[in-house]
Amino acid sequence: MRTRIAYIASNTFREAVRDRVLYNLIAFALLLSGAAILVGQISIEIEKLVVINLGLTAVSLFGVVIAIFIGIGLVSKEIEKRTLYTVLSRPVRRWEFIVGKFFGLAGTLVVNTFFMAIGVFAALFYVSHKFVRADALILVALYFIVLEFLIICSLALLFSSFSSPLLSAVFAFSLFVIGSFAEDLRNFAGMAHGVSRWLATGAAYLVPNFSAFNVITSIAHEQPVAGQLVLQNTLYALFYATMALSGAVLIFEHRDLK
Amino acid sequence: MKRRQTTSIVASTCLVLSLAASSFVLHRTDQLRPQATLDEVLFLGSPKVIKRASLGYDGLMACIYWTRAVQYFGYRHSRFAASYNLLAPLLEITTHLDPHLVVAYEFGSSFLAPKPPHGAGQPERAIELMNYGIQNNPADWKLYYDLGFVYYMELNDYKNAAETFERGSRIPNAHPFLKILAAQMAQHAGEYETARMLWSATYQTTQDKQIKKNAVEHLRALRVDEDVVHLQQAVTRFGERTGRLPASMPELMTAEGFAGLPADPDGHPYKLTPEGRVEVRVPDDFPFATRGLPPGYTPQPKFHSDQP
């Protein structure tokens, strides 16, 4: 079982590389090196802040776009190309296919993030000429970004398991935006009364909460991140991704592929 | 193969020519509409809306708005603008997006507070900005220093300046000069001496070259102001004693027993006008001086070396 999942995951990774997904690294490198050189000339005393903010924001946004646009096609493309039937005619179970796809996409994003992280640290070294201890906090922000990707990958797969690529992209992107406002939704629930309160509270817990994963600004100011937050974000991402993946498996298991 | 090559060459030529032509036309269009710039436009004015729209990437947005504020100020300052309408809103957005962006408070207040053309002439907005900064960064003593600076330099409000410096001096690791400044403000002691201390402290505590240069210019101007006051007093004394104005600076020097010809920080001797006014030889070299300038002179910003 493990071998089959690993096989599907590695194929998904190879397919993403073949699709030139990692080309985004070139754009990222240009963006970051351009910012590192230019900002010092057009602004005042924020070179390091810009490198951290821009670098981590770009890692996050590039990853989200990759997760959504690759994730939404993972199932539907296989159906469209009819390659899914070849896979499922072998001793591969449907849930293994979904889980394999998830790990393949997550792996692609981790590799992508790894190279981008190297870029961020290189740009940081270029503007500061040295590393300080607080720079290690960037690794925490990167870890949170990867956790965010896990959730988005699972959501993209969930939508891909029952919807068209276009609608899946709309759903996944909408959830990403709503998830960024999750705390507002929770505050709104706190202010509402009666049925609205229940509905708003339900919605606030159902949509992913991405705001807790965004520590870029505080890390740019060298503010430490609580260990408890790292633990809880890890657990939240794992539970949420498992939930969405389970939904995808459930739908895909019962989907009529004829 | 040859046909394909020809097509490639034609297409490449068309691409380059069209790009050049469209850029040229756009440039001409911009010249036709000189007002059509983003300079005076703030499409979204509400910091809250911008914070929401940034989808959590508010740190990067703050950097972008801060850069925009710097560019806005720099552009208008270089053209001796009389108004800086967007400066305060841009700084407000920047600091609401990232309340810990201390540099925006420090520089922002020095952009907002001074009178045009050196700044926006909005000391009250600078005070609002600094108070917001202190509220969000209460452990940063430099913000108290900057706020006290605005109270003293722009508003001559000794009471609030003394109180602000005193509050700042209570912050752990605060620079000891805050205590001295608080005491001097409380006694309204020696205006030039206090101003010199403030600018010297600014020079010593900043890493930024522009701020250092600005402090140097103010220190140079302070010396000119002080010299001119003393020399003008000497002229008055001479007049009271002799019933006429001194004919030249050497005559005044001899009568007052000066050791040598008094000179400005650049070594140029001060000149005495037939009307008995003491003036600097090159007013453009002292853009922040308030005395010793020819009547009706408008200062032109000009910076010297960053050494005081």
Image: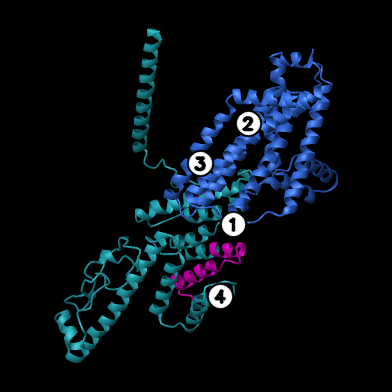
Q: Which residue is mark 4?
A: B169
Q: CA distance from mark 1 to mark 2?
A: 31 Å
Q: Chain of mark 2?
A: A
Kind of element beneath mark 1: loop
Q: Which mark is residue A32?
A: 3
Which residue is located at x 65 percent, y 56 percent? A224
Magenta part of the chain: B129-157
Check the image and tell me how it is coloured: by chain
Q: Is residue B109 visible?
A: yes
Taking depth in this image into account, of A26 and B261 the one nearest to the observer is A26
Q: Are marks 3 and 4 on the same chain?
A: no
Above or below, comparing residue A54 to residue B150 in the picture? above
The crowd level at tag 4 (other Cα within 10 Å; few <14, some 14-19, many 20+) is many
CA separation, marks 1 and 3? Answer: 24 Å
Q: Which residue is mark 1?
A: B99
- Dots 2, 3 in contact, CB < 8 A: no
Q: CA distance from mark 4 to mark 2?
A: 51 Å
Judge whether residue A73 can be spotted in this image: no
Regarding mark 2 in the picture, which secondary structure is present there? Answer: helix
Which residue lies under the disc numbered 2?
Answer: A66
* Type of amino acid under label 1: Pro
For numbered disc 4, what is the local secondary structure? helix
Q: A181 above or below B266?
A: above
Label 1 Cα crowd, 10 Å radius (few <14 / some 14-19 / many 20+)? many
Q: CA distance from mark 3 to mark 4?
A: 40 Å
Image quarter of residue B291: bottom left
Q: Which chain is blue?
A: A
Hey, what amino acid is under mark 3? Leu
